[in-house]
Image (spheres, grey):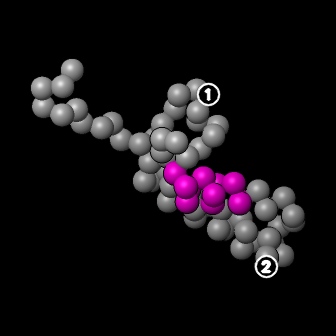
């Protein structure tokens, strides 16, 4: 499967996911914070299933090889 999550997007997803999970474990928020597993997982694997149906990608544009069209 092609990666569709760019570097900054991946970092943000991992940080948000870890923060939500930490808040649950510390008792700051309720059980809904386990939803942090989703951004954590998508950040770690680099693929966001929600982007796929829309053809979205936060990855940079790849340069074409010289002479390729």
Image location (x, y in percent) of residue 41: 63, 58
Q: Tell me what residue is drawn at x 63 percent, y 60 percent.
A: 40
Task: Classify residue 9 as left or right of residue 18.
Answer: left
Magenta: main secondary structure: helix
**Could you tell me if residue 65 is visible in this image?**
yes
Residue furthest top in the image? 69
Relative horizontal placement of residue 61, taking residue 42 as reference (left or right)? left
Question: Which of the 4 image quadrants contains residue 39?
Answer: bottom right
Q: Is residue 13 above or below residue 4?
A: below
Q: In terms of sequence position, does the residue under pointer 1 or pointer 2 come before the other?
A: 2
Q: Which residue lies furthest to the front in this view?
A: 1
Q: In which quarter of the image is residue 15?
A: bottom right
Residue 43 on the magenta span: yes
Q: Residue furthest bottom?
A: 26
Residue 15 relative to residue 20: left or right? left
Q: Nearer the viewer, mark 1 or mark 2?
A: 1
**Residue designated by label 2:** 26
- Crowding at label 2, few (<14), some or many (≥20) Cα neighbours within 10 Å? few
Residue located 55% across and 59% down the image = 44
Q: Residue at x 71, y 60 (%)?
A: 37
Rendered image: mark on residue 53: 1
Quadrant into which the C terminus falls: top left
Please say whether residue 12 is visible from this viewpoint.
no
Q: Is residue 30 above or below residue 52?
A: below
Q: Is residue 30 above or below residue 59?
A: below
Chain part drawn in magenta: 36-46
Q: Nearer the viewer, residue 53 or 58?
A: 53
Q: In the visual, does 39 lie left or right of 27?
A: left
In the picture shown, does residue 50 fall above or below 54? below
Q: Does dot 2 land on a helix, a strand or a loop?
A: loop
Percent position of residue 7, x then y: 42, 53
SS at mark 1 in the image: helix
């Amino acid at each position: 499967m092609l990666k569709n999550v760019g570097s900054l997007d991946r970092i943000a997803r991992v940080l948000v996911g870890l923060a939500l999970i930490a808040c649950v474990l510390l008792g700051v928020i309720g059980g809904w914070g386990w939803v942090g597993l989703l951004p954590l997982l998508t950040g770690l694997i680099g693929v966001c299933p929600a982007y796929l149906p829309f053809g979205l990608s936060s990855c940079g544009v790849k340069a074409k090889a010289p002479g390729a069209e």
